[in-house]
Amino acid sequence: MTYLHFKALHIIFVVSWFAGLFYMPRLFVYHTEANEKPSPEREILFAQFTKMEKLLWNAIMTPACWLTLIFGSIMLYITPAWLDQGWMQLKLAFVVGLVAYHFFTRKILLEIRQGKFRFSSFQLRLFNEIATVFLFSIVFLVVLKNTVDWLWGVLGLIAFAVLIMTAVRTVKKMREKK
């Protein structure tokens, strides 16, 4: 296999991993909101969300995470000079943060399975946006390959994060009025 084959596989599994990272917190939102439903609706929803979360974690998120990291590592093995470049070092720092986010998601998953709901649906909606921030940061770094240009990207990212949080709060207020 060539470098480009590994790169294609890396991208495919990054997309798969992010699909799970975007969807799992959304399931947490629905699962948390189901906690407020009366019985037997609550139990039916719990069983369905638990099944969906387990399948998403075991069949998509975990394999995609590991395969992303494996193929990314192979690409670094093939081109070790990238490790000396600032953009790659910063990207790897974001990847470490993304892996931490992945495992924190697992912690929330296990708590919800035990019936512990320590986050509100609103907090989980905000948590859901963290993956978006990681995605923007990593993609801009990889495409621009320049930490100075990346600084401008960070400013744009902060503006984007503020916009997302404002949108989430606006939607929450609209839902509360109904």
Image: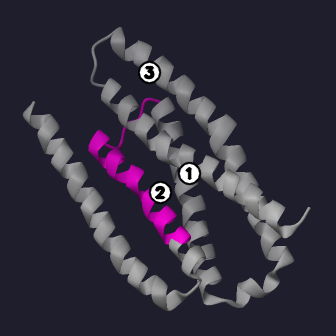
Label 1 vs 3, first from the N-terminus:
1
Q: Quadrant of residue 56?
A: top right
Q: Nearer the viewer, residue 113 or 24?
A: 24
Q: Quadrant of the C terminus?
A: top left
Residue that mark 3 sits on: 46
x and y percent of residue 67 in the render? 75, 53
Look at the numbered disc 3 and give the secondary structure of its residue.
helix
Residue that mark 2 sits on: 131
Q: Which residues are magenta?
A: 114-139
Instruction: Say which residue appears at 56% left-offset and 62% top-offset.
Output: 98
Look at the numbered disc 1 and give the secondary structure of its residue.
helix
- CA separation in Å, label 2 and label 1: 7 Å
Instruction: Say which residue appears at 55% left-offset and 70% top-offset.
Output: 138
x and y percent of residue 75 in the render? 79, 70
Residue that mark 1 sits on: 18
Disc number placed over residue 28 in the picture, else none? none
Instruction: Inspect the image, locate mark 2, and give the three-letter code of the amino acid beneath it.
Output: Ala
Look at the numbered disc 2 and give the secondary structure of its residue.
helix
